[in-house]
Amino acid sequence: MEEGLRRRYLEVMGIQQWVPRTPCVEAPLAAKAVPVPRQADAPGDRVPDWETLSRQVETCTRCAELASSRTRTVFGVGDRQAPWLFIGEAPGAEEDRRGEPFVGRAGKLLDSMLAALGLARGEGVYIANILKCRPPGNRDPKPEEADACRAFLDGQVALIRPRVIVALGRIAAQNLLATDAALGALRGQPLNYQGIPVVVTYHPAYLLRKPLDKRKAWDDLCLARRLMTRAADQIGTPHRSSSP
């Protein structure tokens, strides 16, 4: 990537320029041992269409505590044919109020991360969560809650058919990949979910607390973009991840 563009991307992400950086470069993508994701039963014999799946989420009462405490379900937002799928853990208070994932300060930082890739919310990008309801007090999702929501997420993945998934944070990564491995063990390598390349990085809320780790998140985004480029080259179509 041209140095001036790289610096502009890093500025958009709020990464201080005095910290040494390396540009996104094409590098060999070695095969790694990856977790084997668990498979959940889909709600029906085949994947529902978007409207049906959205209604199923909106009326879901599988988790009594979540159903009774939520204000709104948070289905997901973005391009329904997106090559990029970003997955977080669960809605927070503002997401619960508005019914949209990643709003507030963490959402603004995610938008900056997208801009660093030459992307924008809703344009070639879909954003979803492991859970579609806010856990009371913003606690971590319980395993049984993630299992109950899995068919909805799998339905979204099947409908979108993304070329790359970016898992945002430890909880999203562990639930998506059915592993208890630490975030540090999952980062920095191409993983796999149902045949789709997965890159694990930090949750934007964590990066707000630990801004120096933005440089590591940048490395993760570079890996994701290399995977996107390779996926696009393999099928011979343009990829919406190139520099503007």
Image (cartoon, helix red, strand yellow):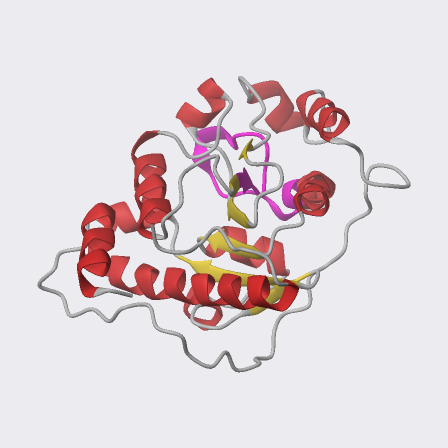
Task: Say which residue appears at 65% left-offset and 63% top-offset.
Answer: 235
Figure quadrant of residue 184: bottom left
Q: Position of residue 137 (x, y in %)?
A: 44, 31
Q: In front here: 10 or 45?
A: 10
Magenta span includes 145: yes
Q: Position of residue 107 (x, y in %)?
A: 36, 36
Q: Looking at the picture, does residue 111 appear above or below residue 54?
A: below
| In the image, residue 223 above or below residue 125 | below
| Span shown in magenta | 127-146
Query: Which corner quadrant of the image does residue 129 belong to?
Result: top right
Is 205 part of what is drawn in magenta?
no
User: What is the quadrant of the N terminus in the image?
Assistant: bottom left
Residue at figure coordinates x 61%, y 63% from the top left: 236
Residue at 69% from the left image edge and 64% from the top image edge: 195
Q: Is residue 236 left or right of residue 41?
A: left
- Residue 121 at x, y = what percent? 43, 36
Q: Residue 29, relative to residue 177: is it above or below?
A: below
Q: Residue furthest right?
A: 45
Please provide percent x and percent y for residue 69.
Answer: 56, 21
Give whichever of 235, 87 is nearer the camera: 235
Viewer-side residue, 14 vs 161: 161
Nearer to the camera, 231 or 85: 231
